[in-house]
Image: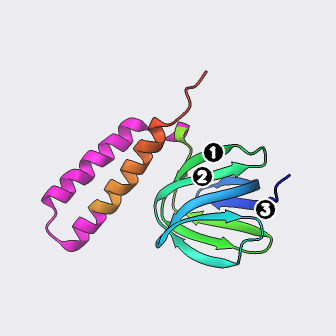
């Protein structure tokens, strides 16, 4: 049986995930990282990405997460993010509308902060749409 560690994901509104896991992958500001049991301690900023969690049964599950902070300690790993969604929670129409709105803002943005905000919104929308397209059909 592979080594496991406790992994928790919190948003301001709920405990999104809490369980023992074998591995976690996500994207930090300087690239993608994999976390396994007995990983070195660190704290780092997370960018919007697809979070992948390998549960104790060895199955991978994916979720969308926004920017936040990851903390790895000896007894658990905690991810604090602004928002997190499982694929089945994503509203595809809303994500598509957000993508269109971000693309329009990029096209007509004049100020640097407007362009930066539009790029970030576009990135979030594209990740959500990608994950939404991968969702499992409901029985």
Name the secondary structure under disc 1.
Answer: strand
Image quadrant assignment for residue 4: bottom right
Q: Nearer the viewer, residue 133 or 125?
A: 133
Residue 57 lies, in percent from the top left, at 78, 43
Residue under circle 2? 52
Q: Say if residue 87 shows up in the picture.
A: yes
* Residue located at (29% from left, 61% from top): 119
Say whether residue 116 is left or right of residue 47: left
Say whether residue 75 is left or right of residue 66: right
Residue ranking furthest to the top: 139
Residue under circle 3? 5
Say whether residue 139 is left or right of residue 123: right
- Tell me the tag on residue 61: 1
Name the secondary structure under disc 2.
Answer: strand
Q: Quadrant of the C terminus?
A: top right
Counting every numbered tag in the picture gives 3
Please give the range of residues in magenta: 88-117
């Amino acid at each position: 049986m592979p080594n496991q560690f406790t992994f928790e994901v919190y948003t301001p509104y709920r405990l999104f995930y809490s369980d023992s896991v074998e591995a976690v992958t996500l994207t930090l500001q300087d690239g993608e990282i994999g976390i396994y049991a007995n990983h070195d301690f660190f704290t780092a900023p997370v960018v919007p990405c697809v979070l992948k969690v390998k549960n104790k049964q060895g199955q991978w599950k994916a979720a969308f997460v926004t920017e936040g902070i990851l903390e790895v300690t000896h007894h658990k790993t905690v991810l604090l993010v602004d928002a997190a969604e499982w694929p089945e929670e994503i509203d595809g129409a809303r994500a598509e509308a957000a993508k269109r709105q971000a693309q329009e803002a990029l096209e007509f943005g004049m100020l640097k902060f407007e362009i930066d905000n539009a790029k970030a919104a576009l990135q979030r929308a594209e990740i959500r749409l990608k994950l939404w397209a991968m969702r499992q059909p409901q029985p």
